[in-house]
């Protein structure tokens, strides 16, 4: 099912998006943003969820719906699909980032220039209440609160735990 939010925004509701997977939290809570605009992105998101579920250090708790939205920055490219997932993880922020970068690479993510088209983009939006600034990782993710691509799917996560 899809629902038009505005002239440029559409929400997609599918079997895994949004969904509550698991209740109860045992370790660390992280919100991961997923995005992409090259190839069958919505199908790829399902594969990423399956891939993450295979990792014994990560449990998916909830997911938001998928939002189709126009690109920002470099605008001469296809619309993006974006969503968020809430995970319970034993991994540290840097270990989680390493895992996400591995998954991006597995799905042929190529970094050509800032805001370029991409098969998959995985970002740590939040990790518990942590505030971290380093050359490799910033938590919370910079500008998350200015991006409809994060804010709208995030609203569907609701109460956590």
Image: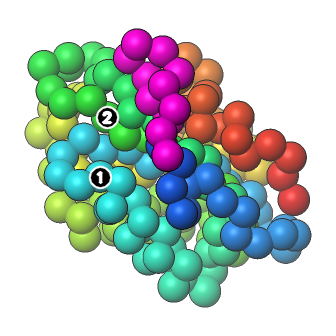
Residue occupying image coordinates x 44% and y 48%: 34
Magenta region? 1-11
The residue nearer to you, when weighing 123 against 14, is 14
Q: Quadrant of residue 107?
A: bottom left
* Residue 110 visible: yes
Instruction: Give above or below for 67 relative to 161.
Output: above
The C terminus appears in which quarter of the rendering?
Answer: bottom right
- Residue 13 appears at what percent x and percent y? 53, 48
Residue occupying image coordinates x 55% and y 55%: 17
The local secondary structure at tag 1 comes to helix
The mark nearer the N terminus, 2 or 1, is: 1
* Residue 149 visible: no
Residue bearing mark 2: 80
Instruction: Give above or below for 31 relative to 24.
Output: above
Residue bearing mark 1: 41
Q: Is residue 54 left or right of residue 40?
A: right
Q: Quadrant of residue 51?
A: bottom left
- Residue 42 appears at what percent x and percent y? 35, 54
Dot 2 crowding, Cα within 10 Å, few <14, some 14–19, many 20+? many
Dot 1 crowding, Cα within 10 Å, few <14, some 14–19, many 20+? some
| Label 2 to label 1: alpha-carbon separation | 9 Å
- Residue 63 appears at what percent x and percent y? 62, 55
The local secondary structure at tag 2 comes to strand
- Residue 88 appears at what percent x and percent y? 72, 67
């Amino acid at each position: 099912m899809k629902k038009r939010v505005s002239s440029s925004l559409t929400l997609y509701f599918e079997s895994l998006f949004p969904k509550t997977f698991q209740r109860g939290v045992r370790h660390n809570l992280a919100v991961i943003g997923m995005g992409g605009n090259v190839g069958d992105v919505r199908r790829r998101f399902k594969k990423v969820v399956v891939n993450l579920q295979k990792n014994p250090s990560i449990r998916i708790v909830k997911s938001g719906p998928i939002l189709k939205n126009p690109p920002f920055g470099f605008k001469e490219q296809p619309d993006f699909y974006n969503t968020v997932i809430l995970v319970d993880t034993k991994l540290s922020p840097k270990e989680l980032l390493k895992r996400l970068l591995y998954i991006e690479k597995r799905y042929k993510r190529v970094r050509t220039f800032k805001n370029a088209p991409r098969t998959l983009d995985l970002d740590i939006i939040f990790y518990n209440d942590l505030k971290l600034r380093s050359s490799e990782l910033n938590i919370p993710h910079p500008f998350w609160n200015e991006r409809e691509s994060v804010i709208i799917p995030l609203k569907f996560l609701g109460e956590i735990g």
